[in-house]
Image (cartoon, rainbow, N blue to C red):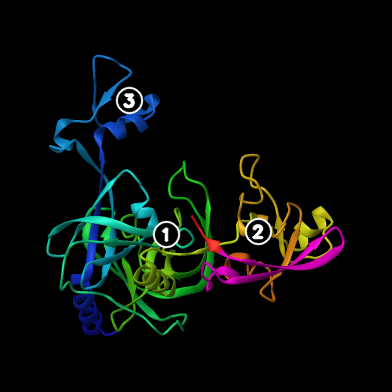
Amino acid sequence: MDDKKVIVVIKKVMPAVVSIAIAKHLKDIEKEMPHEMYSFLPGHHTADKKKWAIPDILVDKRGMVNVGGGSGFVVEQDGLVLTNRHVVNERDAEYTVITNEGRKYPAKVLSRDPVNDVAILKIDAKKLPVVGLDHESRLELGQTVIAIGNALGIFRNTVSLGIISGLSRSITAQEDPKSPLQELRGLIQTDAAINPGNSGGPLVDMRGNAVGVNAAIVYGAQNIGFAIPITAARRDLEDIKTYGKIRRPMLGVRYLILDDALAAKIHAPVAYGALVLRESPHDPALVPESPAEKADIREGDIILECNGEPISMTHTIQDALDNLSAGDPFTMLVWRKGKQWETKVILEERK
């Protein structure tokens, strides 16, 4: 790879890459902190041993404490910023965008994509440098890419070079130990180094266009990182421009994909499709008042096809929903107690 070409791309993209600082009010942090954790934290104990205090030097005049950071990149000159949903998922936090020049702007979260790990922020700024978004959806294994971000929340403007190592990857991710597991599908795998804090930064091609949003790493492994394809982010941006929010469709069903082993275990008549099943006693198989419930889908049903396409490990219900919007019709072929039947629903907006 020609070093000069890499340097040209970095100089083109870097001015539009931003850091995102996350701050929470001291009172909120104290409420959330378990008592048993006090002795492990870098604060000081009060006279009441059951309480813990953050050193005054870490608290600003408004009582706010910096609790983390991430990365993002400007995609519209008037201040639209792309990042990961998990970077800005704290509803009671304040977010500040810090540009490459060091300017700080309060950020408003316009929308969080409930399916893809994407969020869109707005800052009050004009004529900002932007990262172009790739419009050629065909990526190739071995294609050179560059990841840029705020590594570990400390090292701003960190750059790593690599290749696309895999396409259409699926992983199960967790934002933190208290968060539920979430399946992320259709990811770009890269060996370009992605570290905590890089989340939300761009993965760019050698033309300087974003092909993905850096999202996840595999702990304990080397050179395995993942990015959300930019096609998902482009769709979210179009929703923001049209509706003022991200309008992802919801079916409202929990399921397991059948394979040979699971089908044999439960004596299913087929070894494909989605078995409608609750995740726990507190998470029913059907979301109340959802399109699936209105269509009389029941726990134990097997959804064989969606919009005429068989459901399998490589084509899940989420994949079938991926290019649809709230308000679109959605047809399902369902198996129940030895009979197949077809039902059509209208997808609703995911809350």
Real-space CA distance between mark 2 and mark 1, rounded to the nearest whole angstrom: 31 Å
Callout 2: few (<14), some (14-19), or many (20+) C-alpha neighbours within 10 Å?
many
Which percent across, then down, holds residue 51? 30, 21
Which disc number belongs to residue 304?
Answer: none
Check disc 1 and report the residue beneath it: 216
Image quarter of residue 1: bottom left
Report the magenta residues as a range.
320-347
Q: Nearer the viewer, residue 245 or 200?
A: 245
Of helix, strand and loop, which one carries label 1?
A: strand
Check disc 3 and report the residue beneath it: 39
Callout 1: few (<14), some (14-19), or many (20+) C-alpha neighbours within 10 Å?
many
Given the image, on which type of amino acid does mark 3 rest? Answer: Ser
Which percent across, then down, holds residue 6? 25, 80
Callout 3: few (<14), some (14-19), or many (20+) C-alpha neighbours within 10 Å?
some
In screen coordinates, is 322 left or right of 267? left
Does 31 sit above or below residue 5? Answer: above
Question: Marks 1 and 2: in contact by CB < 8 Å?
Answer: no
Given the image, on which type of amino acid does mark 1 rest? Answer: Ala
Residue at point 65%, 46% (across, down): 284
Image quarter of residue 200: bottom left
Real-space CA distance between mark 3 and mark 1, rounded to the nearest whole angstrom: 30 Å
Comes first in the chain, label 2 or label 1: 1
Which disc number belongs to residue 292?
Answer: 2
Evaluate whether residue 109 shows in this view: yes
Q: Is residue 181 magenta?
A: no
Disc 2 vs disc 1: which is toward the camera? 2
